[in-house]
Image: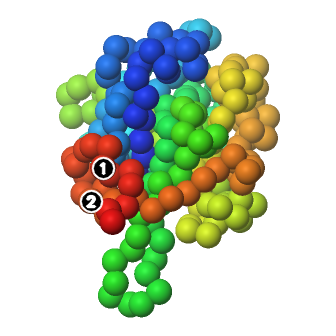
Amino acid sequence: MCGRYTNTAAPEELNERFGVPMLGEQGTRRFNIAPTEQVLAIVAPEGKPEARMLRWGLIPHWAKDMRVGNRMINARVETVATSNAFGPLIAKGSRRALQIADGYYEWLKAERRGEPSQPFLFRVDGGAPFAFAALWTSARVEGRHVESVVLLTCDASPNRVAAAVHERMPVILGDREAQLAWLDGRLDAHDALTLCGALPEQRLSASPANPAVNKAGVEGPELIVAPE
């Protein structure tokens, strides 16, 4: 499960990191990205990677209303290929996406019943930008054209840093080679899924975050550090 994440980098850093011109400030310098918001992603509908803003929460072409997307923020790698909503997308490089981030939040359940869960911020390589493996599509819903995205999750048990907080973790593509391969139309669903293992634990760090991140819409660098 991944329900909140960060993309705090400036567009110039992302331009250099991913080799794709970003959309100015759109989607950047964010400390509390939540489902249903517009998020920064890289897609390759014509084979050439480009940046777009997509609604987080996939809305399939057959959806009757936008509420469907509220339940489709994550897709499990174990079942994504056989899903009616996700299977047709993962089979095509043109429908695979890189959802840009530089951290994600997960909540550790309290040992005592009734006490609040503690949010943790997970970072890759000390805070460098990376990409979640994601899928995207377009649809016409409620009279308007919508482009939306869903990120993939995997079993966290191979990564002890992630597994100490939650049993699931997002699929993180931390290297340029894996990112380009994910968007490559020559890879079928099976080959694309071989890229979707848990990130090595040596590359992941976790630290307590501010419980204020629990509320969508709250922003600021103070969210990524637990209050004293």
Residue drawn at 74 percent across, 38 percent down: 195
Report the amino acid beneath label 2. Ala
SS type, badge 1? helix
Question: Looking at the image, which residue sits at the far front?
Answer: 228
- 102 vs 35, left or right, is right
Numbered tag placed on residue 222 in the rendering: 1
128 to 82, vertically: above or below: above
163 to 132, vertically: above or below: below
The quarter of the picture where the C terminus appears is bottom left
Mark 2, Cα crowd under 10 Å, few <14 / some 14-19 / many 20+, is some
Residue 27: x and y in percent read: 35, 28
Residue drawn at 43 percent across, 81 percent down: 110
Using the rendered view, name the quadrant where residue 16 is placed: top right
Of 59 and 113, the residue lying toward us: 113
Report the amino acid beneath label 1. Glu
Residue 160: x and y in percent read: 70, 64
Residue drawn at 20 percent across, 28 percent down: 143
Numbered tag placed on residue 52 in the rendering: none
Instruction: Let me know if residue 173 appears in the view.
Output: yes
- Which residue, given by chain and number where applicable, does mark 2 sit on? 212
Mark 1, Cα crowd under 10 Å, few <14 / some 14-19 / many 20+, is few
72 to 102, vertically: above or below: below
Using the rendered view, name the quadrant where residue 225 is placed: bottom left
Q: Nearer the viewer, mark 2 or mark 1?
A: 1
* Labelled pair 2, 1 in contact (Cβ < 8 Å): yes
Count of numbered tags? 2
